[in-house]
Amino acid sequence: MAYVRKGVTFVGEENGVAVAVAVVEREEGEFELRNIAVAEKEQGRGLGREMLRCALMYAAGGGAKRITVGTGNSSLRALAFYQRNGFRITGVIRGFFDAYEPPIVENGIACRDMIRLTFEIGA
């Protein structure tokens, strides 16, 4: 998770406790959402959407025309979340997760490929 040191981290807090986080990495003018997470007991309250809004505002303020994100083919909730929030599938990196040990399995699906999604800022 070296991207945490390289990126900008946004933290959502309630009563002094971190309940959500987003990390955006900027490299050579490109912006990538590297992580977004909400504490399990806090999910379903719109906190992920709020963290995404912060990330998009940061990227737009930095002159970005788009921001990308990658997630596993088996991460069904994440894929739905990004698409509900305006991201479009723009690519697949086949076999990206094949060498992971132990293998990743989510929702009964082997995680093998990285799905790349892009949000067009200002579109």
Image (cartoon, helix red, strand yellow):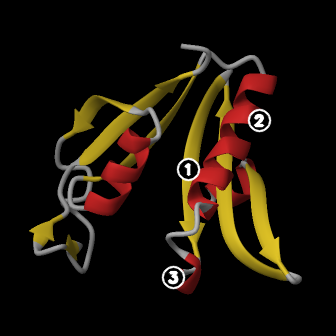
Q: Quadrant of residue 10?
A: bottom right
Report whether residue 86 is seen.
yes
Find disc 1 in the rendering and name its residue: 34
7 sits left or right of 45 in the view? right
Instruction: Name the amino acid, label 1.
Output: Arg
The answer to whether 67 is drawn above or below residue 13 in the figure is above
Q: Secondary structure at mark 2?
A: helix
Q: Residues within 10 Å of mark 1 (few under 14, many from 20)?
A: many
Residue 33 on image: x %, y %:
57, 44
Residue mark closest to the camera, 3 vs 1? 3
> Circle 2 is placed at which residue position?
58
Residue farthest to the front?
45
**Residue displayed at 13% across by 67% down:** 110
Amino acid found under the numbered disc labelled 2:
Tyr
The CA distance from mark 3 to mark 1 is 19 Å
Q: Secondary structure at mark 3?
A: helix
Asked if labels 2 and 1 touch by Cβ distance under 8 angstroms, the answer is no
Tell me if 11 is positioned left or right of 88 in this view. right
Amino acid on which the number 3 mark rests in the picture: Glu
The crowd level at tag 2 (other Cα within 10 Å; few <14, some 14-19, many 20+) is some
Say whether marks 3 and 1 touch (CB < 8 Å).
no
Marks 1 and 2, Cα distance to the nearest angstrom? 14 Å
Residue nearest the observer in this picture, 123 or 102: 123
Residue shown at 74%/34% (left/top)? Answer: 57
Nearer to us in this view, 6 or 23: 23
Per the image, the residue denoted by label 3 is 40
Residue 81 place in picture, x, y as percent: 40, 51
Q: Earlier in the sequence, mark 2 or mark 3?
A: 3
Label 1: which secondary element = strand
